[in-house]
């Protein structure tokens, strides 16, 4: 029995492989405003979890404060969910009601 493939079989396989490659979906991680979490704590979260510089962290914190919601970053789904869990765990440990959500962008 021969294991050789015809040119047609190889061509179809290559065409099928090219069609399946797509970039992963992106998800935004957002902080939601509340009346109890301190601005300093939000800046700390943005700096430590999302690796934002001081100026950018303050800008996002002010966006959350004034608009009610602010984008911290966009990631693949798994990373976005991990960042969300880190924020929620830190907020709970510090006694803050800060909420963090993940949405497809």
Image (cartoon, grey):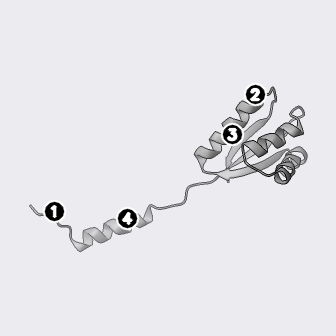
**Alpha carbon separation for disc pair 3 and 1:** 51 Å
Frontmost of labels 2 and 4 is 2
The crowding category of the residue bearing disc 1, from other C-alpha atoms within 10 Å (few below 14, some 14 to 19, many at least 20), is: few
**Alpha carbon separation for disc pair 2 and 1:** 61 Å
The crowding category of the residue bearing disc 3, from other C-alpha atoms within 10 Å (few below 14, some 14 to 19, many at least 20), is: many
Circle 3: element type: helix
Q: Residue at x 63, y 41 (%)?
A: 81
Query: Along the polypeptide, which appears first: circle 3 or circle 1?
Result: 1
Q: Quadrant of residue 79?
A: top right
Frontmost of labels 3 and 4 is 3
Q: Is residue 25 left or right of residue 18?
A: right
Q: Percent x, y for residue 31? A: 78, 42
**Alpha carbon separation for disc pair 2 and 4:** 48 Å
Q: Percent x, y for residue 73? A: 72, 51
Residue that label 3 marks:
84
Residue that label 1 marks:
3
In the displayed structure, would residue 77 be above or below residue 94?
below
Q: Residue at x 81, y 46 (%)?
A: 69
Circle 2: element type: helix
**Alpha carbon separation for disc pair 2 and 3:** 12 Å
Q: Are marks 3 and 4 in contact (CB under 8 Å)?
A: no
In the displayed structure, would residue 100 be above or below residue 59?
above
Query: Along the polypeptide, which appears first: circle 2 or circle 3?
Result: 3
Residue most extreme to the left: 1
Circle 4: element type: helix
Image quadrant for the C terminus? bottom right
Residue most extreme to the bottom: 7
Residue that label 4 marks:
16
**Alpha carbon separation for disc pair 3 and 4:** 36 Å
Residue that label 2 marks:
92
């Amino acid at each position: 029995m021969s294991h050789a493939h015809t040119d047609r079989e190889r061509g179809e396989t290559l065409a099928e492989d090219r069609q399946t490659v797509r970039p992963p979906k992106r998800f935004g991680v957002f902080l939601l405003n509340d009346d109890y979490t301190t601005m300093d704590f939000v800046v700390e979260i943005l700096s430590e979890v999302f690796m934002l510089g001081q100026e950018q962290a303050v800008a996002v914190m002010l966006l959350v404060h004034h608009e009610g919601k602010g984008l911290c970053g966009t990631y693949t789904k798994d990373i976005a969910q991990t960042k969300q869990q880190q924020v929620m765990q830190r907020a709970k440990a510090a006694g803050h009601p800060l909420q963090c959500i993940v949405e497809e962008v």
